[in-house]
Image (cartoon, rainbow, N blue to C red):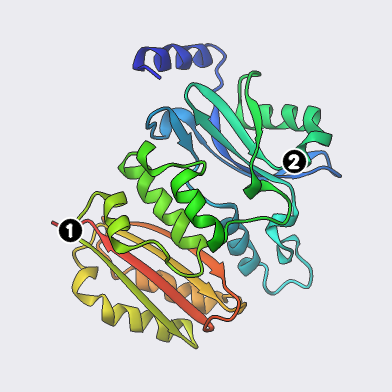
Amino acid sequence: MKETDYYNLMKGFESEELEPMVGIFWYLPEEHRLFEVYASSLSQSKMVNGHTTYHKLHKTIWQAKRCRDKAKEKSVYYQDYTRIPRGRVFYDNGKFIVKVGSWYKQYEDELRELVEDAFNLPDDFVFEIGRHWELGHGWDESQLDDFFHEGDLCADDLGIDDRKALIHELVSTASILTIAKSELAYLLEDKNIKVFKAHSDSMERLLKQVQEQASSYIGITSDCVFSIYTDGTELCTTDMDSIHEFMSLFPKTCKFKWGLGYVSGSAPFNIILVLSGWK
């Protein structure tokens, strides 16, 4: 999209005092409403070749909510996040696209109205079905290659900020970091990149272990991407405190992207840490 076309589009929305947004949501058809809507305005999102989307994952948000509700007897977050209808709003080549599963067809009229209202979308937005948003489906290792090379976000179409977000998507949803360090360096456009892995039976020992490995780089890095995953052990308050304490070791200007995950058969606590951005 040309800059002048984008400007005219924005002026049109300004006249209505509503600005369109990209983001993610869950949908509760029995209650006729959207649930856990997360959005960012289009004007505040970085556009690269006409493609914009929200930077956070359904999976990461859901697991953080599950950790928060650990002490409750019942919580909606105890169930699999993929079993509740969900979708993602993209802006691509001048048009808003809402990625959903095939489940949307029986609710299309109601869902269109709810999404249009929640994200301030123009009425010509379109629904597209993607396998990731089918009920019971999420990203797994068998899908990463398709996602990286042929999926909804193509590395060649993204600028540096969006490539970092893509790395976050890959790292926080993979049980093993399957892409090579050279590919990570290509995505970051930074030859100075280090990847560290560690596992332990406690979060405190895990972070101390990776801290020792990465000590030479923690003080100079400006970009930190890490994924913490467990064998099913849920994080408690002290675990989250350990994570925040670990993050406090980095420079105040350091930008973080991180996620939580579950991998069957892994050690109780695991981390993949990617550092870059030093001169």
Q: Residue at x 52, y 61 (%)?
A: 173
Q: Residues within 10 Å of mark 2 (few under 14, many from 20)?
A: some
Q: Residue at x 37, y 76 (%)?
A: 197
**Quadrant location, the C terminus:** bottom left
Identify the residue position indicated by label 2 in the image. 102
Q: Is residue 68 above or below residue 121?
A: below
Circles 1, 2 touching at the beta carbon (< 8 Å): no
Q: Amino acid at mark 1?
A: Trp
Q: Is residue 76 left or right of residue 30?
A: left
**Quadrant location, the N terminus:** top left
Image coordinates of residue 38 in percent, x first then y, are: 58, 43
Label total for image:
2
Q: Is residue 275 above or below residue 85?
A: below
Q: Residue at x 38, y 73 (%)?
A: 245
Image coordinates of residue 141 in percent, x first then y, are: 53, 63
**Label at residue 278:** 1
Instruction: Place residue 117 in its image quadrant.
Output: top right
Q: Residue at the right extreme?
A: 30
Q: Is residue 228 above or below residue 107?
A: below
Q: Secondary structure at mark 1?
A: loop
Observer-nearest residue: 84 or 208?
84
Observer-nearest residue: 23 or 249?
23
Q: Report the Cα–Cα distance between label 1 and label 2.
A: 45 Å
